[in-house]
Structures are given as structure tokens and as C-alpha cells.
Image (tube, helix red, strand yellow):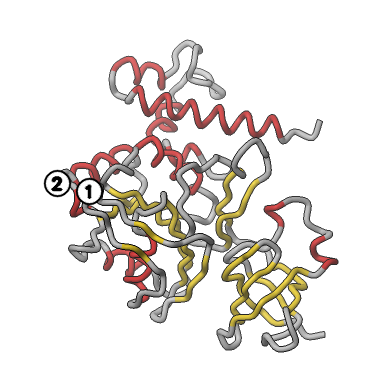
Amino acid sequence: MSHYLGRVSMQHHNIYSVIMEADGAEVRARTAGSLSRQFKGNADYPAVGDWVKLDRESGEGGDAVICEMLARKSALIRKEAGLGIQGQVIAANIDYVFICMSLNQDYNLKRLDRYIAVSSCPGILPIVVLTKADLNQEAESMREEAMRRNPLIQVILCSDRQGVGFDRIRSIMTGNVTAAFIGSSGVGKSTIINRLLGTQAMLTNAVREDDGKGRHTTTHRQLIRLEGGGTVIDTPGMRELYLDGGNIGDAFSDIAELAALCRFRDCSHLSEPDCAVKAAVESGELCKTRYRNYLKLMKERDNLKRKRRPW
């Protein structure tokens, strides 16, 4: 039997929409039973962005069957909400994550640290997009603050009303690049995607004048090909993002540099002598709030590792 290459564009429980690579047609599909039996957890199942092989190249004859999943080159993963310990794939085979945070009541540097930590996965480059810049007179200083906090991360100011920032985002979305957009509900992810598409494909609601919050209608992850090249994945609003994958060291590069100067290589930066991180906090070189947020994320990561031990 011939198998045809496609890419998962949407997922609704155990039903998938798959865009065929040959002609761009979209078909409904289910995973073959023999394939499903190979999966050990939720993260093993197809996710938006995954490349798969189907038993047909059209939607005729009912749902297609996903017979094979190609190896992922990258995956953005968070821990499932609640008390569970399984990972949940937000998007697969992506090159960039645009972390969107609006410059109104949504702006939160501690949450930004978390988003960057989760997004700093192998093969993925996080980029911060500060949206609704026109609503805050301190937009530029807030961008500089985010850059100082994360010197290795590109930070883009964006405003739909002013048309600012979209050219920089569009310049990244070329060729075979795939990028996921994440952030809290209403920060303007769908608005940015509409700009990239040049159409109102992603429905959005007007910004309320009293709080400057947009209201968008994204309720599921969705992959969309851009006409000029590149692919975007829109995601539902995520106020809570539980750490699973990612790299805390990349999100806290300033602390990682200090940690290299500690006496002990495995220093926890809590009570060890000659700890360069604690010394930086005491001298005021390192912000106490950022230090505490770093310790919180490290503890969350270590607790999850302990829960997942096989014994």
C-alpha cells in the first residue's frame, strides 16, 4: 500500500486534520490501531505540526488512516495541567516560538521567564513579542527591561494600530520556517497571524477601550501555511504554562554565567559557601525577584523529574 506525506494542521481528540504535501488538500484522519499501540503517553501521539504518512491522498471514502509518524526535529512541550505528570505537545517541528505578551495588564516578567524557559528547547529559538505597544507610553523602556533580563532573546515591539513590528516578524517567516505563537488569551496572537496572512482568517474581536485587552476566538491549535512562505501555528491562550521540557539555563543566561563562578559545580545557590549567584543577589547585581523565580522553576523541574522516576 502506498503511503502519502502530510502534516497535522488540527487535532480534535482522536480526529486529526492533515494537509497533504502533494497538493495542499486537507483530509480528516485517525491513527491506525497498530500505531496507537506503540505510544506510551500523550506526547507520543500526533500533534499539530507533526509530519505523518497516510493511506490515501484525498478525503474520499471517509477518514484517512495515519500509518506512520516521522521523527520530530523539535517539540514544544508543557506539563499537562493539574496533578498529572505527563507532557503535552503544544506544537511539533517548529523553528521559532513567538512569545506574545501585551503591554497592558498582561505584562508580567515572572511569567515571561517561565515562557522562555519552556520555549528554550533543542532546535527552537524563542522570540519575545510585546504587543499593543500603542497602549503604553513606557513601551520602549519595557522592551529594554525585557532585553536586559534576557540578553540572548530578541524582543520585538508590536502594535496593530500603528503597524509596528510586523515587518520584523514577517522577515523571519520565510521559506520552510515554522513558528508557533503562544501567550495569554487576548494578547493579539491571532491579530499578528492575520497580518501575516493578509486576511481575517483568524477571527478576532475588538479591543475594549476600558482595559485595552483584545478578545480572540482561538480555541484549538491550528497550523496555517503562509502564501509567501513559512508556516504558523496559532494556539489557545495559556495563562498557566507548566514546565516540562525547555532549558532553564537559557531563560536565565545571566544566572548561568554567575553559576559558572561558584565554588561547587553542582551548587544549588541556596546555602553553599562561595556561591557567586547568592553574592550577586546580596550585592544588588542580581534582582532578588528574578533569583527567587529561578529557584521556583528549578524546584518545579526537579519535582517533576522525581515524580517520573520509574520506582
Indicate the amino acid at tag 1.
Asp
What is the C-alpha distance between the residues marked 2 and 1?
Answer: 16 Å
Few, some or many residues within 10 Å of mark 2 (<14, 14–19, 20+): few
Asked if the residue at tag 1 contacts the one at tag 2, i.e. Cβ–Cβ closer than 8 Å, the answer is: no
Residue 186 drawn at (x, y percent): 37, 54
Q: Residue furthest left?
A: 137
Residue 156 drawn at (x, y percent): 28, 55
Which image quadrant for residue 197?
bottom left
* Vertical position of residue 251 compared to residue 292: above or below: below
Q: Is residue 21 left or right of residue 68?
A: left
Residue that mark 2 sits on: 137
Closer mark to the observer between disc 2 and disc 1: 1
Residue that mark 1 sits on: 210
Most foreground residue, 74 or 199: 199
Residue located at (73% from left, 79% from top): 64
* Vertical position of residue 240 compared to residue 178: above or below: above
Q: Quarter holding the C terminus? A: top right
Indicate the amino acid at tag 2.
Gln
Residue located at (51% from left, 43% from top): 241
Q: Quarter holding the N terminus? A: bottom right
Most foreground residue, 178 or 197: 197
Few, some or many residues within 10 Å of mark 1 (<14, 14–19, 20+): few
Q: Is residue 308 left or right of residue 20?
A: right
Residue 85 drawn at (x, y percent): 67, 39
Residue located at (33% from left, 54% from top): 129
Q: Is residue 309 left or right of residue 290?
A: right
Most foreground residue, 225 or 273: 225
Residue located at (27% from left, 68% from top): 167
Residue 72: numbered disc: none
* Vertical position of residue 199 compared to residue 272: above or below: below
